[in-house]
Image (cartoon, grey):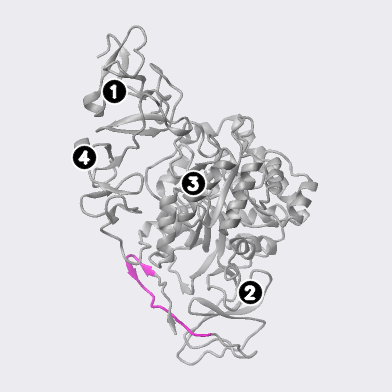
Amino acid sequence: MGRLALCVFAASTWLIGCGVQENPSTPSATEVGCAGCTVLKGGVVFDGSRAARATVVIEGDRVKQVVFGDAELGVEAGGGEVVDVSGKTVLPGLIDLHVHSLNVAGPYAFYDGDLHLEDHTKAMLRAGVTSYLDLGSSQHVIFEQRARIHAGELLAPQLFAAGPLLTPTGGHPCYHGNPPGDFCIFIDSPADVDGAFEALLPRAPDFVKIVLESGGAQRLPHLARPSVEAINEAAASAGVRVIAHVAEAADIEMALDAGVTLFAHIPDEDPISPELAARMAAAGAVVVPTLSMKDGLYRTVNGTLTELDDPALADDVPAGVIAALRDPSMLEELRTARYRALVKAWREQGIANLVTCYQAGVTIAAGSDAGNPGVFHGLSLRREVALLVEAGMPPLAALAAATRAAADVLGRPDLGRLERGALADVLVVDGDPLADVRALERVSRVYKSGVLLDREALALPRKTSLAREPRTGAGPGEACLAASECAPAQSCNPAQVCAATCSAASDCAPGSACFLDGGSFTGGACIDGDGCDLFAQDCDNGAACVFWGNGSTSCWNAGAGSDGQPCDASFACAPGSICDPSNTCRALCDPRGERAAPCPGGERCVDHTALAGLPVGTCEPAGRR
């Protein structure tokens, strides 16, 4: 007899004791339930394949019975709980196959510097999303989150993660001029694949995500077929499935040629022909269309994101994100006539391609791409299901896409269904989503691993912690998901790593800089530089090497401006220049005259060695002080 490890809490206190798991036995036709069980009686049950009146019995963290038709309850006196769900529908917990856990749903211009991982996790739980696949987040953060969930330290959906994306140098999403950090691993030929997997496999990714993105009118570097074949072979040897981000029909054709059959997104740049769709179906391909991503962007740019009018949105979406989506200045670059036309065309083409694929028999599984503008975590998966129905999929198939079909993609037959032995992730909604798919919005109950969640306690304004016990005392270099996790005199720096607390450069070891955070009670944290060469400008992917002070240099986002030109909005300049306090790009120079060409005529090299902790200066007009 085991004890259920996952319990629910409100505020910082765990509220509900653990249930008891016993070996299930085969019931007779008239005996339903058991001492210690939870019996959901009187409603319609969608088990992942069919829907009918039925009774669901939960014992411990598993589904013990699903009895279709009217059933006589054999619950022992004083044991078990019978829940009347008349007028409601009982479903498996939903599964979102495309989430960016750390990205917010605000405009592209919005950034608040906060880690919203816990906020997004709460929103998914409240919506009944009990499992999800992260397809692009800082790898050391997302794998730390997964480890804590697996260890039972956090209340959270089951998390599956891909980690860094495999893309060509300069490819989506690590465009030329950006340091890849731990978001991308560059693959420019098959020779790069072995090294990529040596870096990937110690993290045990659940999937390998490759990027096939041409960039539309502004062409991007693209993975070649030999590289995709090498990736697929290496992944197969490691027992990991490949999922391909695609944008055009040709991307799917090439991926199929290379043996890849799982696709993130439905192409929206051009039509999928009936012949290609038939080939996809014959190959057993699965498409995760993410219609809600283009739909969310479409409604954001057109001012029809009606969720913003609902005061209850604040229970699931950070206040700063809501404010940014209401701020015209944040949306200015998205609301040009040209961009609106592009988004409209993408949305329409994506829906048309979904119809072609579904009619050809291609398997459709659900994912929202949460973390894009107007694509809210948790809430957008039910929007995705509604869009599938609007596109012509029968409601039963659309619900299966977010349950059983999604679980099959994850290789988890114990998820996405209500049947004997399945994990008791259960969603109860008011009404019938087969008649009105918007019933998914009317959440009545959510059970995670057999435990009823306190949805009210998980609303963001309540500030409930998801940690079973708070973590403290993390040392230098250890991953941190909150400032409170680091040891005394340590802060959780912007890279989500514990580092020395600082208020000035002198508080940090040489080679690391002090980054101040006005929203942090500790003031700032030290961040180690990467030692790039200011004069050789040796950063990968065309990023710019800049100095931060205290002898630290780091690869940083490159801008377009060079000597004397304005800095970009993110205070970035072209490699070889740095943004000065007047928001002007200044060329780097060597005050000793040993490593860099002299400043152009009329300019002088102003020595910043004392500030930078390195022999470096900037070229400035001769009369400027």
| Residue at point 40%, 70% (across, down) | 8
Q: Position of residue 81 (x, y in %)?
A: 49, 83
Which tag, 4 or 2, sits closer to the chain's start?
2
**Image depth: mark 2 or mark 1 in front:** 1
Which tag, 4 or 3, sits closer to the chain's start?
3
Q: Secondary structure at mark 4?
A: loop
Residue hosting label 4 = 503
Q: Secondary structure at mark 1?
A: loop
The residue under label 3 is which amino acid type? Ala
Residue 17 is inside the magenta segment: yes
Give the magenta-colored segment's residue range. Answer: 9-23
Q: CA distance from mark 4 to mark 3?
A: 32 Å
Which tag, 2 or 1, sits closer to the chain's start?
2
Note whether 446 is above or below 300 in the view shown: below
Q: Is residue 510 left or right of residue 393?
A: left
Q: Which mark is residue 546?
A: none
**Image depth: mark 3 or mark 1 in front:** 1
**Image depth: mark 4 or mark 2 in front:** 4
